[in-house]
């Protein structure tokens, strides 16, 4: 019995030591490219955007057109639409996978603080019932961001347009 316990103890100490031997292998080179970083940097707002907006914009930026079923070398650009219940992004990609332009539209998202403050300051006592956030992005220009808001006060209703800074259009 004593010999079997010593044998099991010896085996228990030696087998784990074999697991510590590691082989050094050289891995293939990996290239990390952020193709659509300009798009994400341009459409981001200073304030944290609504979750559906961020989700869809990041999905469009991360989309790999070269590995999709519609990719062919002979076309110069591709249009891909991304949908969720809160909105959509229609993105045009060049043959390298870079976003050329987008048209984005989101309904009933949380408005930025400066837009809410501008509406409350100009229309006190009015309630925001609906809002639409639209973005038009073109590669070499700054994006155009607009908010269309429906305000209600009793039986009266008006619609107003604002830019991303809270200026009325």
Image (cartoon, helix red, strand yellow):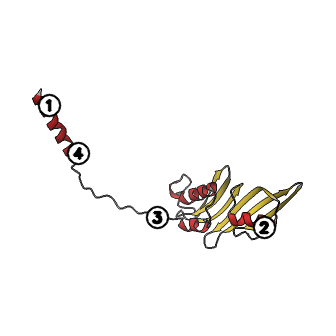
Which of the two discs, 1 and 3, labels the residue nearer the N terminus?
A: 1
Q: What residue sits 53% from the left and 53% below the top?
A: 68
Which of the two discs, 1 and 4, labels the residue nearer the N terminus?
A: 1
In the displayed structure image, the side of residue 33 where residue 110 appears, left or right: right
Q: Which residue is mark 4?
A: 19
- Give the label on residue 96, or none: none
Q: Dots 1 and 2: beta carbons under 8 Å? A: no
Query: Would residue 17 be visible to someone looking at this image?
Result: yes
In the displayed structure image, the side of residue 6 where residue 20 appears, left or right: right
In the current view of this chain or complex, which residue is farthest to the top?
A: 1
Q: Dots 1 and 4: beta carbons under 8 Å? A: no
Q: Secondary structure at mark 4?
A: loop
Task: Report the Cα–Cα distance between label 1 and label 4.
Answer: 22 Å
Q: Which residue is mark 2?
A: 121
- Give the label on residue 33, or none: 3
In the displayed structure image, the side of residue 17 where residue 112 appears, left or right: right
- Give the label on residue 5, or none: 1
Task: Report the Cα–Cα distance between label 1 and label 3.
Answer: 58 Å
């Amino acid at each position: 019995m004593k010999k079997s316990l010593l044998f099991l103890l010896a085996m228990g100490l030696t087998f784990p030591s074999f697991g510590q031997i590691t082989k050094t292998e050289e891995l293939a080179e990996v290239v990390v490219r952020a193709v659509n970083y300009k798009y994400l940097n341009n459409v981001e707002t200073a304030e944290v955007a609504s979750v559906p907006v961020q989700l869809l914009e990041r999905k469009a930026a991360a989309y790999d057109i070269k590995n999709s079923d519609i990719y062919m070398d002979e076309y110069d650009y591709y249009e891909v639409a991304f949908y969720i219940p809160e909105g959509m992004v229609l993105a045009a990609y060049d043959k390298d996978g870079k976003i050329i332009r987008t048209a984005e539209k989101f309904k009933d998202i949380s408005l930025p603080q400066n837009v809410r403050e501008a509406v409350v300051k100009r229309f006190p006592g009015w309630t925001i019932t609906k809002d639409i956030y639209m973005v038009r992005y073109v590669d070499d220009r700054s994006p155009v961001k607009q908010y269309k808001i429906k305000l209600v006060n009793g039986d009266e209703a008006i619609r107003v347009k604002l830019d991303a800074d809270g200026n009325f259009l």
